[in-house]
Amino acid sequence: MTAVVDLKPFTADQAQLPATLELSGIAHSFGGFKVLTDVNFAVPQGRIVGLIGPNGSGKSTCFNIVSGFLRPKAGRVLLSGRDIAADSIQARTRHGLMRTFQTPKVFERMSVLENVMVGLHQQGRSGIIASMLRTPAARRELDQLRNTAEQACRKFGLDRLLDEQTGRLPAGLRRVVELARAYVGAPRLMLLDEPSSGLNTEEIEQLRGWIAMLNSEGMTILLVSHDMGLMTIADTVHALYFGEIIASGPMAAIRAHPRVREAYLGG
Ligand code: ADP
Ligand code: MG
């Protein structure tokens, strides 16, 4: 049993939405050390759901189980009703799951536009880009890819940086490039791992705007972070503590929750 979930997990409105992602009975351990115990929550279609918790509470483990970097010892991970717990990372990407990393993983020596084009390739929309340069048809396809990537860049305010070398950009912009690359693949579910880490206050404010934009376009988002400020963007937040969800609800309620306060402040 999950410990104390004494706040309503979802608003009535959310409970009626089909779940894009559903974790049920997830358990994990490393060398006999239990890290997650019976974790259950859903990410309803079109919503932003947050997973918060102090260091070591199991957020990354949970995130890695959803994204496919780890197989859970028990439980199911359903993506639009299909159990993906045993699928490879690539198969999950094909099924519409896209992640970003705590430290943005961008190709530093490639331009901003090329980085975003990789997102189209990752989604399996094209063959190996290099192999496409050979025929006129392939060239046309490459032009299309470039157009799509350019549009995505424009959307994220990167239009003046298309040819910049990505490794030269400040952390906040590298994060935006990573977001644009994930976005361009049109995922059903976007997983954001500590997206505000390494960003300054102004960059975090901009990040909130991009996350809101993704969501307003109907993208479902799972946001993992220890940043309570950023978390106010989520419709529902689940608080993890020593591998168990101890409270679920809107961020304001989570912040005020006695067990969460105890977990964060030690009393
Ligand atoms: P969070 O992301 O909330 O900080 P993690 O999921 O990274 O928490 O870690 C949860 C617990 O699992 C911690 O006690 C951590 O030390 C442990 N842990 C995480 N990854 C491993 C691993 N690969 N091997 C052993 N222990 C791990
Ligand atoms: Mg972590």
Image (tube, rainbow, N blue to C red):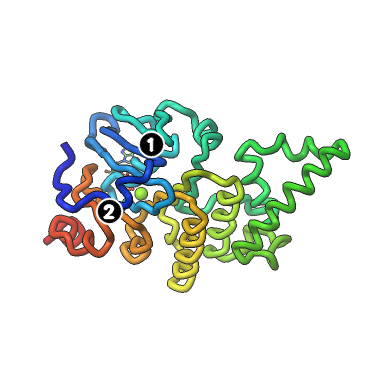
Q: Residue furthest right?
A: 136
Q: Is residue 231 rendered to the left or right of residue 191?
A: left
218 or 144, which is in the foreground? Answer: 218
The reply to whether residue 110 is in sight is no
Q: Residue furthest bottom?
A: 202
Instruction: Assign a secondary structure to mark 1.
Output: helix
Q: Amino acid at mark 1?
A: Ile
Q: Amino acid at mark 2?
A: Thr
Which residue is depicted at the point 73% across and 60% down?
Answer: 163
77 or 12, which is in the foreground? Answer: 12
Q: Residue 265, image x and y in percent?
A: 18, 62
The reply to whether residue 262 is in sight is yes
Q: Nearer the viewer, mark 2 or mark 1?
A: 2
Q: Residue 113, image x and y in percent?
A: 69, 55
Q: Could you say which disc has been placed on residue 217 in the image?
A: none
Tag 2 residue: 11
Q: Is residue 166 rendered to the left or right of residue 27?
A: right
Q: Residues within 10 Å of mark 1 (few under 14, many from 20)?
A: many
